[in-house]
Structure formats: structure tokens, C-alpha cells
Amino acid sequence: MPDLPLIARARSHSASIAYRTASQSFTYQDLINRSASLATALLADTDDLNEARVALLVPAGFEYSASQWAIWRAGGIKVPICLSATEPEWEYALTDSGASIVLADKSMAAKIAPLCSRLGVRLLDIDSITSAPSKTLPDISPDRRAMILYTSGTTSKPKGVVTTHANIQAQIESLIEAWEWSASDRIPLFLPMHHIHGIINVTSCALWIGALIEPFPRFDLSAILDRVLSDAFTLFMAVPTIYVKLIQALESADEKDRAAIVAGFARLRLMVSGSAALPASVHEQWTALTGQKLLERYGMTEIGMAISNPYHGERRPGAVGKALPGVEIRLKAESGAIITGEDEPGEIQVRGPGVFRVYWNRPEASAESFDESWFRTGDMAVLERGYYRIMGRLSVDIIKSGGYKLSALEIEAALLEHPLIAECAVIGLPDDVWGEAVTAVLVLKETATLDLPTLRDWCKGRLSVYKVPQRLLVVSELPRNAMGKVTKPAVRALF
Ligand code: MCA
Ligand code: AMP
């Protein structure tokens, strides 16, 4: 039976190193073998998972990718969930996706076991699975659904973005071509593995081409800088917040250290920024420090990467470049007209083989997100001298903080559970490090008082750390329009 293309490709570079840490290396053959064992355990006494949803709760690294391949080779749909999410957030992802299995490593398994037993979900601890004899694995067609990624949007709760194997392959091949990935590339991995940036741009591209990944348990600045110094990498991909943190670190380093680290960065073949707007000032500061011109690109969970500055040619600060290979872009004006010239802003709409199928179990939201065959991103852009420039989002209820997309509505719903909060409005305010800072404007119940540390403390266990408000303003009433509706621009004007 034919292998999934990514497995067939891995066989062709089976002896190369796929993952390397300070203490261990794993080859592509190790990935093939380990994923076969895990797939066998997942299948138990069935022949095919037939698109059963398998939630993945494994830290970034060899075992994560082996687990991902195992789910796919067994015929399941991978639902990666955030390692640091709260129990209510995990419960939502498991119940919304209808996951029947959770695949976790030993330490995460211990944390999620009570939830699994409450929900009646099978929990498989990968550390308890040694090299089981591998059974015959099912034939997987490219049209089969492969992944559900939860993304926040204009609805309170995150929606599950469903992509097929063919969608994922198209997303990978587009980046391999545009950014000239090769088997000799080496890339650090420090991004979360429940979002496309870490899953597709870093690991899937690397594993497709036979490159090497060096995983870090978290964004550990000094460990990463150490490895940059040792020329461990050829490629580097990060969100703008990380570049801001790198600049701060370099500026506070002593002269000798700074010169050595800067020289390390200067030797990289390519450094990419994305997931949120890279301020032109950060782009320029990075070039001034290292001589590297960051390549900024634009993407979205629903479509993969869509627009990119070129690998060869001008990388323009403040702009995201042109459509990537295989991706069609159009701008649609508020009037409904398709924009054909430059300098006129419109909504970015995207078409191509990488674009997702539907939101899981949400036919209405799925239908609304397409304009005929074009996906409506909700982002505004303008074409200037041949390059797209992102102007912002159509919805005020979407916040981007540290590269994470957050729903103001979801945070508001959580805050309204607080016994002292009568009303609230959540907005994102510009922030030099995080891009936007989650900001809560509250009306408290009579005579109540609440300060930011107390509110943040209360949020722990309810909201992931990056959703917890960073700023707080208490008011006696929220600004409303004539219809009585809270108006976010007026809330913003309070600052
Ligand atoms: C954490 N902290 C924050 C935030 N997050 N403060 C303000 N705003 C935030 N968003 C605080 C914590 O409360 C903590 O405070 C301190 O920062 C350290 O927290 P930690 O989580 O350890 O932070 P970090 O490790 O330094 O994380 C920063 C990070 C991370 C590495 C930039 O946010 C990250 O990995 N972001 C990437 C997300 C991503 O991959 N997005 C791509 C989505 P205290 O010290 O007081 O406790 S995919 C996408 O967008 C599309 C497809 C695309 O185009 O890529
Ligand atoms: P996500 O849902 O996490 O995939 O986030 C996708 C969103 O991130 C897009 O709709 C944009 O709003 C934003 N985004 C991604 N890349 C960029 C970029 N280079 N510049 C501005 N916004 C970006």
C-alpha cells in the first residue's frame, strides 16, 4: 500500500538526523519506526481510525512528530492542544472536536487523566509504549481530513479549522519553494506546537525536506543565543515579540558577547517573522544590529502562509510582499468591487490548494467565511509598489498578543463569571513588546473594588496566561451607542 507522501519522503533520507538535542539525536528512520509503533498502539484492535479525533498533548520534539505521524498513519485526525491551557480550555477542545483518544507523554498524561476519565476519553501515555510490533497500517488518501487546529475569532469560543493531508502538503510545498528549504537546513523550534507557525512553517517543512530540527522546551533566550553562537542553525522563524526580546537582550549584553551573537545571526541563511505585524522600526533595528533583513510573511490558520516578502529581492519593512506559490490573492473593497489597482484598501481574500475545508461542526460559520470560492480573511490590506501592506483587521474583537490570536469575546465571557464584575469590554491596546496588550475595562458591582493583580490571580486556571488581562481600567459605565450597544472604538478612546 502507498505510504503517506511525508513517510515516503522520510524513507528517502532515512539516515539523516531529524531531531537533535544536547543529549540525543533521532534519525528519520527513528521517526518512521516510532510512529509505526505508536500507530499500532492507537489502532489497538481496529484497522483504521477512520478520522477519529486524537488530541495531542506532547511537548515539542521527536516524540511530538512521531505522535503526529502515528495519528496520520493510523487514519486519525490530529487535534493538537496547548500544553499550558487550563482544564476548561482542554475540556472545550476535547468535547468540541469529539476527541475519543488523548495521546500524551507521561507528565501531561498525569495532568489530563482526571479530565479524560470524567469525559470517558481513552488516554494513551506514549511513554508506556515501547517498540510494539507494527501492524499493517491503512491506506490514507490525500483528501482525508488530517488536522483540526483551534483558532480564536469573532465568536466567543475558538473554532476548529479542518485541513486535509492535501491542504497541508500544499502549504508545505509552497514554503519549501519560496524560501528555498534544503536538506542541509537546521532550524530551532521554540514556538508552541498547537499552531501553524510551529507545526507547518518550522517542523513540517523541515521534515518534508529532510532538514534538522533542534527543539527547546520553551522560548529560552539564553539557550537559543548560545546555539546561534555555535552556528547550530541556518534558518530562524519567530514572531515579532521574539525579535523585540532579542533586540532587548542584545542591547543589554556586554560589547564582546553582543558582537559574537550578532555575528552568529549574521551568518544565518534566512530569518523569518510572522503571525503578527512586524513594526518597520523593529525590522530596521534588526538590520542595523545584525545586517540581516528579516523576511516578513503573512498567514492564517485557515490558509497557511499566503503572502511573503521574497527570498531574493527587496524585503520591505512594513510590507508582507506578494502571493506565495500556489496562492491566489484578491482585495475586495467595502463596496463589493474587486480592487484591480494599487493604493486602494480592501479585505484580503485567498484561494488555493492550501485553504482549509470547513470549521469543525460549524456549517454556518464555514459558509460565511467564504465569498464564492474565496476565503475571507477579515484582514485589510493595500497593494503599494507591487507589495501588500496589512492595514489591520475588520473585527475589533480579535486581538493579537505575542503572536497568539485571541477573542475579546471569549475573555469577556470568562471575566463576567467574576462575582464582582457587572459589565466588561476587552480590547487590545498597542504594546511595544507584545504587539497588543489584553486590556479589560470593567464596571464593578456596587461598592466593589478590584485591582489588576487580584484579577490576574483569579484568571489563573480559567484562562491561558496570554489571555489574562495585562491592563485594567475600572469605569462607572461603558460607552454605548444610541442603540445601547457598547462601542469598542469609544472604549479604546478611554485610554
Ligand atoms: C505571556 N506573558 C504575557 C503574554 N504572554 N504578557 C503580556 N502579553 C502576553 N501575550 C507574560 C506571562 O504572564 C509571564 O509573566 C511572562 O510573560 C513569561 O511568560 P511565558 O509564557 O514564559 O512567555 P515567553 O515564553 O517569553 O513567551 C513569549 C513568546 C510566546 C515566546 C513570544 O508568547 C510565544 O511562543 N508566542 C508565539 C505564539 C505563536 O506561535 N503564534 C502563532 C499562531 P510573569 O513573568 O509575570 O509570570 S499561528 C499564526 O499566527 C498564523 C498562522 C501565522 O501567520 O503564523
Ligand atoms: P491565526 O489565526 O493565529 O492563524 O492568526 C492569523 C492572523 O494573524 C491573521 O489573520 C493576521 O491578522 C495576523 N497576521 C499574521 N501574519 C501577519 C503579518 N505579517 N502582519 C500582520 N498580521 C499578521
Image: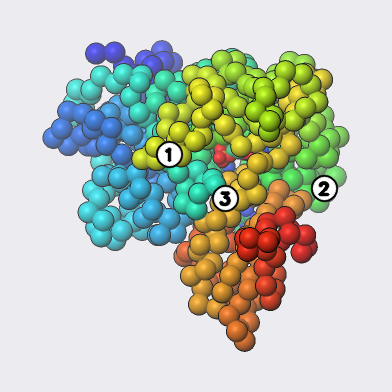
At a point 71% along the width and 22% down the height, the residue shown is 339
Q: Which mark is residue 251?
A: 2
Question: Ligand 1 within 8 A of label 3's CB?
Answer: no
Q: Earlier in the sequence, mark 1 or mark 2?
A: 2
Secondary structure at badge 3 equals strand
Q: Earlier in the sequence, mark 3 or mark 2?
A: 2
Q: CA distance from mark 3 to mark 2?
A: 30 Å
Q: Residues within 10 Å of mark 3 (few under 14, many from 20)?
A: many
Residue 265: tell me if it is visible: yes
Q: Earlier in the sequence, mark 1 or mark 3?
A: 1
At a point 31% along the width and 18% down the height, the residue shown is 141
Q: CA distance from mark 1 to mark 2?
A: 50 Å
Q: Nearer the viewer, residue 348 or 261?
A: 348
- Say which amino acid is labelled 1: Glu
Secondary structure at badge 1 equals helix
- Say which amino acid is labelled 2: Glu
Residue under label 1, please give it: 364
Look at the image and tell me in which quarter the C terminus lies: bottom right
Q: Nearer the viewer, mark 1 or mark 3?
A: 1
Residue under label 3, please give it: 406
Residue 222: tell me if it is visible: no
Q: Position of residue 267 (x, y in %)?
A: 73, 26
Q: Which mark is residue 461?
A: none
Disc 1 and disc 2 in contact, CB within 8 angstroms: no
Look at the image and tell me in which quarter the N terminus lies: top left
- Say which amino acid is labelled 3: Leu
